[in-house]
């Protein structure tokens, strides 16, 4: 599945004016509810102490983001997810655990509620009604997605030979970040306690990344920085936070990105200079969105 929402990705009734109006109304009602009662995490916890961040005015051309948006975590979170993305307005967003249906709605909300227009490409490797619903004969696509403010080309979608307990893979596109052409990867490795599968998956991903002079790798690796299965990844790329890296005694200073206070999510850079990386506690997933500003000049 690919591309700027075509007939293969959107049901015909959703393309009608009535369909859009209903979805916009649902979004407005959800925003109203969030304003009254506040959002909650999948576990019910709140981030009441998190300081409010003023949204940026437009897309930031040298900013990228990775976010495992959590599935299943409820359709009602898509308005909030779009609002959090709009707060930081990255040029490129890599999503994991993404249903096509949810990505479409987030993309619609970004455009119609926040004035931010993104292209989209999908890297789905699983079609399973229990994950994404849909009609029994057409279950929703589930996997990765990349949203980019600039057009994308040369998409590839690679399924790992063995995903572990669930099919996994990576996708890659060529797009523009910081005014330069760059290859962007997005992946989701095998689940926790499946180290041997992740090692084999990195053996597929790392050589693909190494073929490019400039590359950005976004994704949920389900492993902490000093996990042995990530060794080959560290040999071809560095973290967008320079202080976060494996060391002889463990890891450097790495921000926790999950509700269980571990770093599983990465912005890996190859041939690109890091400027700043930030993690933003989120009420809409068990992973937090992370953005990185980079320098390709």
Image: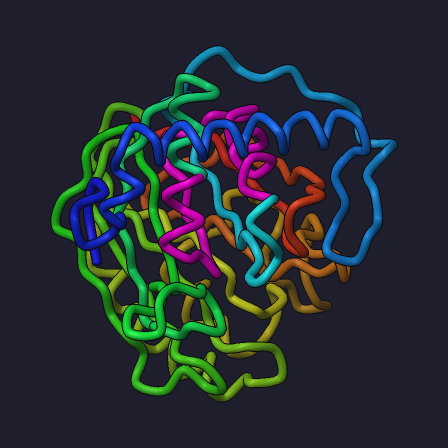
Left-right relation of 70 to 211: right
Residue 230's spot in the image, x, y percent?
A: 49, 71
Q: Is residue 226 left or right of residue 11?
A: right
Residue 12 among magenta residues: no
Q: Is residue 83 magenta?
A: yes
Q: Position of residue 79 (x, y in %)?
A: 55, 35
Q: Residue at x 54, y 52 (%)?
A: 69
Q: Nearer the viewer, residue 89 or 181?
A: 89
Where is residue 1? Give x, y as percent. 21, 58
Magenta stretch mostly in which secondary structure? Answer: helix
Of all residues shown, which one is farthest toward the right?
49
Q: Quadrant of residue 205?
A: bottom left
Q: Residue at x 36, y 87 (%)?
A: 162
User: Which residues, given as a range, are shown in magenta?
Assistant: 77-105
Horizontal relation, residue 126 to residue 183: left or right: right
270 relative to 118, above or below = below
Camera-nearest residue between 157 and 25: 25
Q: How is the image coloured?
A: rainbow
Q: Nearer the viewer, residue 19 or 164?
A: 19
Labels in figure, total: 0
- Extreme residue in the front direction: 18
279 sits left or right of 125 in the view? right
Q: Position of residue 160 (x, y in %)?
A: 32, 78
Which residue lies most toward the left here?
154
Residue 200, by quadrant, is bottom left
Quadrant of the snapshot with the C terminus: top left
The residue located at (40%, 17%) in the rendering is 115
Please tell me which residue is depicted at 51% across the width and 61% down the height of the picture: 220
């Amino acid at each position: 599945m690919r591309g700027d929402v075509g007939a293969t990705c959107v049901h015909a009734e959703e393309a009608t004016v009535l369909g859009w109006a209903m979805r916009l109304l649902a979004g407005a009602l959800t925003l109203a509810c969030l304003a009254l009662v506040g959002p909650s995490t999948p576990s019910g916890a709140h981030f009441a102490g998190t300081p409010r961040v003023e949204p940026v005015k437009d897309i930031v051309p040298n900013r990228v983001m990775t976010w495992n948006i959590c599935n299943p975590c409820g359709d009602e979170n898509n308005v909030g997810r779009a609002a959090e993305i709009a707060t930081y307005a990255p040029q490129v967003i890599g999503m994991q655990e993404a249903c096509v249906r949810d990505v479409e709605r987030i993309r619609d909300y970004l455009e119609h509620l926040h004035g931010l227009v993104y292209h989209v490409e999908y890297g789905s490797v699983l079609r399973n009604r229990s994950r994404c619903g849909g009609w029994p004969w057409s279950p929703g696509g589930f996997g990765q997605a990349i949203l980019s403010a600039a057009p994308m080309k040369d998409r590839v979608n690679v399924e790992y030979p063995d995903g572990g307990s669930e099919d996994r893979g990576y996708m890659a596109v060529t797009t523009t970040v910081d005014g330069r052409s760059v290859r962007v990867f997005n992946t989701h490795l095998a689940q926790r306690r499946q180290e041997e599968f992740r090692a084999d998956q990195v053996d597929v991903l790392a050589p693909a990344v190494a073929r490019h002079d400039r590359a950005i790798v976004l994704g949920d690796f389900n492993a902490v920085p000093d996990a042995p299965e990530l060794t080959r990844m560290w040999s071809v790329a560095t973290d967008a936070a320079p202080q976060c890296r494996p060391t002889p005694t463990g890891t450097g200073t790495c921000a926790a990105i999950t509700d269980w206070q571990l770093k599983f999510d990465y912005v890996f850079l190859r041939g690109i200079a890091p400027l700043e990386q930030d993690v933003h506690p989120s009420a809409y997933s068990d992973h937090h969105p992370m953005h990185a500003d980079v320098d390709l000049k």
